[in-house]
Amino acid sequence: MGGTGRRIVSIIIIAIGILLFASEIPSQALPFTTVYITRPGRFYHRRSCLALKHGARAISVSNAREQGFQPCTRCKPPTW
């Protein structure tokens, strides 16, 4: 197998590795995904959640988890 053939095989192997790795991480569960919290609340929510009817503050999933917030059981926001 020549240099070009090995290069093509290497590219294919790398592409397969990237696809396998990416498929294990749900896109909605990335740490920088935005969720919403209310002032007195203990939970974080999706933007469409009915619990946010009185307003909310945007925050990342990772920050919400670090601050002790739990995912809302009604709207089921992303977790990681």
Image (spheres, helix red, strand yellow):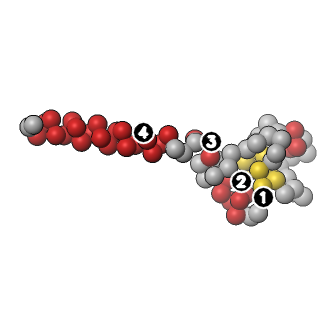
Which one is earlier in the sequence, the residue at label 2 or at label 4?
A: 4
Work out whether residue 39 or residue 61 is closer to the camera in this orientation and state it.
61
- x, y percent for residue 55: 86, 46
Which one is earlier in the sequence, the residue at label 2 or at label 1?
A: 2
Judged from the image, the secondary structure of the residue bearing numbered disc 4 is helix
Q: CA distance from mark 4 to mark 3?
A: 17 Å
Identify residue for label 3. 28
Given this view, does label 2 or label 1 mark the residue nearer the observer?
1
Checking the image for residue 59, the label placed there is: 2
Work out whether residue 72 or residue 60 is closer to the camera in this orientation and state it.
72
Residue 50 showing in the rendered view: yes
**Residue at x 70% of width, y 64% of height:** 66
Q: CA distance from mark 4 to mark 1?
A: 32 Å
Residue 57 showing in the rendered view: no
Given this view, does label 4 or label 1 mark the residue nearer the observer?
4
Find residue 75 and report its image quarter. Answer: top right
Which one is earlier in the sequence, the residue at label 3 or at label 1?
A: 3
Judged from the image, the secondary structure of the residue bearing numbered disc 2 is strand
